[in-house]
Image (tube, helix red, strand yellow):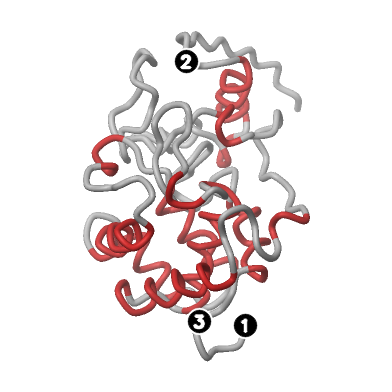
Amino acid sequence: MALNIQVSVKVAGDFNSATAQSLRNGILLGDRGVTADGGATSDLQGDYPPTAPGAPSGSGYRSGADRHVDDRGADLPAGKPDAGGRGWWTSDRERHAVDYLMHHAGLSEVGARGVVSRWKNVEASGGPSEVNRIGATGVAQWLGPRRRGVVRGDFEGQLAHAAAELNTSERAAGDVLRRARTPEEAAIGASMYERAEGYNRRTGRDYFTTRTRRGIPGVAGASGASK
């Protein structure tokens, strides 16, 4: 049985047509969406652009224009940039981040590589100095209260900030990443940590989980470890 559903989305100046479309898609896509499962992005970071009326305090949402969400609201396919070095990320920097997250946050190797894949392939290909148009800063594109203490360009400080979150306020994501044994589990843990468009609390997935998973083989492994 086909349902003909019309959704009207009223947006503020900072939201463009791509964002409005991704919101419509989220409502219509059910368990992949932002509202159909009871507010999948309603209790998280407070990352909506401040001009958005009615934006829930503490969501992991960022503008579709910044993340290049496709117009179906689906996971973006992996392409050549998802494997190997990308932008600022070199093998040595990837390996250092993986080692740091394993040693300071207790993540499994694949869990740490999942987080680094997320950072280099989705969040910040430009590394710790990257800031998007709504002020999201650093490798994890921190916004709102979670950005406090993050210094632009300070890679070591940002790794410490991420590890501290994974051990405390983001322990739920950290626990998934500590238990992760497969790229899929690692990608879900990374999505739980970032909580971007389409985030679903029930599944732990967002629109970028598949891209994150597909990028994990291209992330350098821990020092002295094979992939």
Residue 163 got which mark?
A: none
Q: Quadrant of the C terminus?
A: bottom right
| Residue at position x 41%, y 47% in the image | 138
| Nearer-the-camera pick, 24 or 93 | 93
| Nearer-the-camera pick, 225 or 54 | 225
Instruction: Give the residue type that dot 1 points to.
Output: Lys
Q: Which corner quadrant of the image does residue 99 belong to?
A: bottom left
Q: Earlier in the sequence, mark 2 or mark 3?
A: 2
User: Quick check: 54 left or right of 99?
Assistant: left
Where is mark 3, residue-wise?
222
Instruction: Give the residue type that dot 3 points to.
Output: Ala
| Residue at position x 50%, y 68% in the image | 93
Name the front one of labels 3 and 1: 3
Q: Secondary structure at mark 3?
A: loop
Q: For the image shown, how many numbered marks are present on the structure?
A: 3
Q: Earlier in the sequence, mark 1 or mark 2?
A: 2
Instruction: Give the residue type that dot 2 points to.
Output: Asp
Percent across and percent down for residue 148 are 23, 43
User: Quick check: 31 left or right of 132?
Assistant: right
Where is mark 2, residue-wise?
14
Q: Marks 2 and 1: in contact by CB < 8 Å? A: no
Q: Secondary structure at mark 1?
A: loop
Q: Marks 3 and 2: in contact by CB < 8 Å? A: no
| Nearer-the-camera pick, 153 or 109 | 153
Whole-angstrom CA distance, mark 1 to mark 2, is 42 Å
Q: Quadrant of the N terminus?
A: top right
| Residue at position x 52%, y 67% in the image | 186
| Residue at position x 59%, y 71% in the image | 91
Query: Are there few (<14), some (14-19), or many (20+) residues within 10 Å of tag 3?
Result: many
Where is mark 1, residue-wise?
227
Q: Secondary structure at mark 2?
A: loop
Q: Is residue 5 above or below residue 63?
A: above
